Image (cartoon, rainbow, N blue to C red):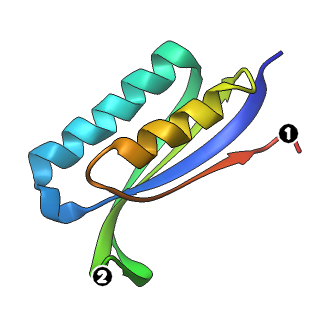
Amino acid sequence: MANRYETIFIINPEVGEDNVKALVEKFKNLLETSAQLENIDEWGKRKLAYPINDKMDGYYVLANFSSDPNFPQELERIYKITEGIIKYLVINKDK
């Protein structure tokens, strides 16, 4: 049974515009192949609420998707090992 989730991730804008677009595309493709992507919303470059790794800005991306309960754990693992992701959060909207 599929649950509904929301994820937001922040990309370090210092990796360059091409790499930011590549990371957004990477996670969009991952969500399309491993889950049912409902929508993806690029908020763009914004000021962080507090410094993260001495960074004051980040490129925000919000996505809503449905998947089996095991996929969000795998998504978080991929966030952790992807260079350029400075912060992420996955929320189960069904709880």
Relative to 72, does residue 54 appear above or below in the rendering?
Answer: below
- Residue, far right: 95
Evaluate whether residue 45 shows in this view.
no
Quarter holding residue 45: bottom left
Q: Residues within 10 Å of mark 1 (few under 14, many from 20)?
A: few
Marks 1/2 in contact by CB < 8 Å: the verdict is: no
| Residue at disc 1, secondary structure | loop
Q: Amino acid at mark 1?
A: Asp
Evaluate whether residue 54 shows in this view.
yes
Q: Residues within 10 Å of mark 2 (few under 14, many from 20)?
A: some
Split into 4 quadrants, where in the image is the N terminus?
top right
Q: Residue at x 63, y 34 (%)?
A: 72
Residue with the mark numbered 2: 56
Q: Residue at x 79, y 44 (%)?
A: 93
Q: Nearer the viewer, residue 39 or 5?
A: 5
Residue with the mark numbered 1: 94
Q: Nearer the viewer, residue 30 or 82?
A: 82
Relative to 20, does residue 1 appear above or below in the rendering?
Answer: above
Number of labelled discs?
2
Question: How far across and down, in percent of the image, does residue 10 sit?
Answer: 39, 59
Q: Residue at x 72, y 20 (%)?
A: 68
| Residue at disc 2, secondary structure | strand
Q: CA distance from mark 1 to mark 2?
A: 33 Å
Question: How far across and down, in percent of the image, does residue 25 sit?
Answer: 30, 32
Split into 4 quadrants, where in the image is the C terminus?
top right
Disc number for residue 28:
none
Question: How far across and down, in percent of the image, does residue 69 sit?
Answer: 75, 27
Relative to 47, does residue 66 appear above or below in the rendering?
Answer: above
Quarter holding residue 60: bottom left
Sequence order check: which comes first, mark 1 or mark 2? 2
Q: Amino acid at mark 2?
A: Met
